[in-house]
Image (cartoon, grey):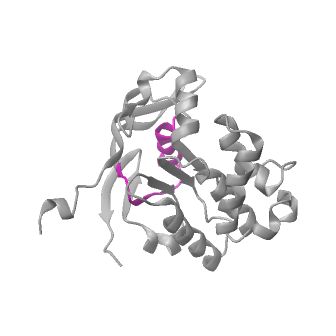
Amino acid sequence: MSSADHPAPRLAVAVRGVEKAFADGETRSVILPGVDFDVMAGEMTFLVGPSGCGKTTLLSIIAGILRADAGEVDLFGTRLSRLDPVQLARFRAREIGFIFQQYNLLPALTAVENAAVPLIIGGATGSAAERAAAELLDRLGLSAHLDKVPAQLSGGQQQRVAIARALVHNPGLLVCDEPTSALDGVTGGAVVALLRDLALSSQRAALIVTHDERIRVCADRIAHMSDGRIDRIEIMAAS
């Protein structure tokens, strides 16, 4: 079989020599002493390791929330260090979808309004954004809950709204920080399986920080991190 039948995976994220330290008075704590890390499109990559090893810091730098002190991060060929703050904010809004541990839904907005936020930020009209959000929420089984505010939704339903918000603008990179920590095992597994179905394609990658051993079966690669470095990459067997 020719190589054309199995094209090489596309590199979504390239991290090279990334360093980050934080100062607390006269004390300087080195969190990332120089990280090299790749994330491939079409794959779900888990970033795992003990608390305090630098996972969330690395995720935040990859997502353009924090600036690295040294080194480079390329997302789909765009070098983040070359973007000024306005360009970076626009790039992040267009190319990255976020799912946070605590959902971060806006309490005064309905489910469909929350899910539509990235499209509105990107310049879509409210009606067009809400139509697209409603279609995605319907795929997530929430068509009966579009007009409910977060306080009227269960934890699993809020998580699905957060998934819709992360995917509605069709970003290239989906980043998740402990997306199943507040969910039971069955719901958590269903959420990650749903992410695989909705998020993964040859043009998109998913990077998930997690401590949840129950969902490791969903990963394509698991990057094991300690003391601010990637120790090894575990490639999971195809199911």
In the image, which residues are magenta? 39-64
Query: For the point 34% across and 41% down, which residue is it?
Result: 14
- Is residue 73 shown above or below 46? above
Residue that protrudes farthest toward the top in the picture: 84
- Is residue 237 shown above or below 163? below
Residue 204 at x, y percent in the picture: 43, 52
Q: Is residue 57 magenta?
A: yes
- Is residue 98 shown above or below 235? above
Left or right, 179 with reference to 29:
right
Query: For the point 44% across and 74% down, which residue is it?
Result: 217
Q: Is the N terminus in the top left, top right, bottom left or bottom right quadrant?
A: bottom left
Q: Is the C terminus in the top left, top right, bottom left or bottom right quadrant?
A: bottom left
Residue 233 at x, y percent in the picture: 31, 58
Residue that protrudes farthest toward the left in the picture: 2
Query: For the point 51% across and 34% down, which residue is it?
Result: 64
Question: Is residue 26 in view from this perspective?
Answer: no
Residue 42 at x, y percent in the picture: 38, 58
Q: Nearer the viewer, residue 149 or 226?
A: 149
Q: Nearer the viewer, residue 171 or 130?
A: 130
Left or right, 232 with reference to 219:
left
Residue 119 at x, y percent in the picture: 66, 42
Left or right, 222 with reference to 127:
left
Q: Is residue 73 magenta?
A: no
Query: For the point 31% across and 74% down, which residue is it?
Result: 237
Question: Is residue 172 in view from this perspective?
Answer: yes
